[in-house]
């Protein structure tokens, strides 16, 4: 059973897709298509897998394994991703558009996660599409592990702009990014920006009548006007 409600409206048993007439026109999947017709009626077509944009959406059945926390952090991360959940999702597949990260091309970051319902047979896979062609081609696995941290290198050839991260937790021994799951699948947006060699750090009080603020470098020297240009990894103290 594949349910991608909110994207296509639903993908039912045997690969029959339902398309809401008021949201989308034509969507292609596995060479077949579905479309809305005049008067708001739905037309269905049979296929093996749903697609949205350039990405195939895996079908599956919700099971015990689900993601509790996911974070993307590091010196080359300009916008951190911090996702958390307190319960298992109701659908096998979820696309998260509000939880996203921005990472720098050619940089590194740490991806950390915790999950519930993980057994020794659970495949935990993290897939990236760095060239933005709709194919997840780099996978990092933590099979059977309910938590972990992985150092990720952003390729120098990564396409600038919006990319995708897919997290798969499944107990059906199927390990490819687009295969069906018995568990849960999460897609997150990862934006790729050009590497920044310098950054500007500025501090100021929120109320000058209540005090002042000082920015010091690693040697303890106050910096004029509470502002400085620094490189990634430089340390400062705010007093």
Image (spheres, grey):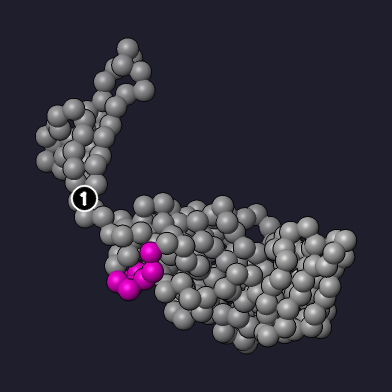
On the image, the x and y values in percent for residue 126 come to 50, 73
> For residue 239, what is the image quadrant?
top left
Identify residue for label 1.
198
Q: Can residue 98 be seen at all in this image of the molecule?
A: yes
In this rendering, is residue 193 above or below 29?
Answer: above
On the image, the x and y values in percent for residue 25 come to 73, 66
- Horizontally, is 60 left or right of 44 in the view? left
Residue 80 vs residue 189, the one in the foreground: 189
Residue 33 vs residue 67, the one in the foreground: 33
What's drawn in magenta, residue-wise? Answer: 152-160
> For residue 112, what is the image quadrant?
bottom left
Secondary structure beneath disc 1? strand
| Residue at 68% from the left image edge and 80% from the top image edge | 29
| Residue at 28% from the left image edge and 59% from the top image edge | 195
| Residue at 78% from the left image edge and 58% from the top image edge | 22
- Horizontally, is 150 left or right of 239 in the view? right
| Residue at 54% from the left image edge and 54% from the top image edge | 99
> In the rendered image, which quarter contains the N terminus?
bottom right
143 drawn magenta: no
On the image, the x and y values in percent for residue 110 come to 38, 63
């Amino acid at each position: 059973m594949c349910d991608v409600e909110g994207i296509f409206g639903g993908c039912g048993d045997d690969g029959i897709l339902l398309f809401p007439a008021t949201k989308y026109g034509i969507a292609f999947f596995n060479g077949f298509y579905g479309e809305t017709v005049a008067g708001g009626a739905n037309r269905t077509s049979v296929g093996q897998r749903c697609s949205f944009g350039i990405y195939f959406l895996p079908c599956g059945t919700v099971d015990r394994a689900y993601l509790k926390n996911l974070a993307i952090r590091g010196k080359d991360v300009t916008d951190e991703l911090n996702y958390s959940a307190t319960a298992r999702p109701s659908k096998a597949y979820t696309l998260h558009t509000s939880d996203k990260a921005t990472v720098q091309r050619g940089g590194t970051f740490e991806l950390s996660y915790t999950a519930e319902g993980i057994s020794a047979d659970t495949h935990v896979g993290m897939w990236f599409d760095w060239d933005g062609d709709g194919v997840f081609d780099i996978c990092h696995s933590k099979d059977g592990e309910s938590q972990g941290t992985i150092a990720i290198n952003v390729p120098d050839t990564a396409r600038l702009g919006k990319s995708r991260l897919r997290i798969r937790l499944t107990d059906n021994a199927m390990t490819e990014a687009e295969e069906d799951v018995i568990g849960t699948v999460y897609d997150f947006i990862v934006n790729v920006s050009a590497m920044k060699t310098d950054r500007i750090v500025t501090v100021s009080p929120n109320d000058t009548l209540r005090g002042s603020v000082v920015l010091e470098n690693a040697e303890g020297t106050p910096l004029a006007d509470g502002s400085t240009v620094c490189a990634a990894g430089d340390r400062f103290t705010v007093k």
